[in-house]
Amino acid sequence: MKTPEEKPFFVRSATLIWFPFQVEGNALRDPITGMSLPQNLFV
């Protein structure tokens, strides 16, 4: 398996998708699935 330095990652295009997360303490909750994600994951 190659390391990231040996095999660079290229992105040709990207689409921004907005999800209406709800703030619950130190987490963001997805109202559609109910899944909570730590806010520091997005920093």
Image (tube, rainbow, N blue to C red):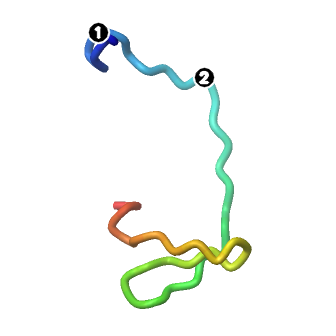
Residue at 68% in and 55% down: 17
Numbered disc 2: secondary structure: loop
Query: Quadrant location of residue 22?
Result: bottom right
Residue at 40% in and 61% down: 42
**Which residue bears the numbered disc 1?**
6
Whether 24 is drawn above or below 18: the answer is below
The reply, left or right, for residue 21 in relation to residue 9 is right
**Which residue bears the numbered disc 2?**
12
Could you tell me residue 35's position as x and y percent?
58, 72
Of the pair 40 and 37, the residue shown nearer to us: 37
Are there few (<14), some (14-19), or many (20+) residues within 10 Å of tag 2?
Answer: few
> In whole angstroms, how far apart are the C-alphas of marks 2 and 1?
19 Å
Are there few (<14), some (14-19), or many (20+) residues within 10 Å of tag 1?
Answer: few
Whether 16 is drawn above or below 6: the answer is below
Residue at 51% in and 74% down: 36
Numbered disc 1: secondary structure: loop
The reply, left or right, for residue 38 in relation to residue 3 is right
Q: Specify which label sits upstream in the sequence, 2 or 1.
A: 1
- Circle 2 or circle 1, nearest the eye: 1
Residue at 48% in and 89% down: 24
Could you tell me which quadrant the C terminus lies in? bottom left
Name the kind of residue labelled 1 in the image: Glu
Name the kind of residue labelled 2 in the image: Arg
Could you tell me residue 20's position as x and y percent?
66, 75
Could you tell me which quadrant the N terminus lies in? top left
Residue extending farthest right: 32
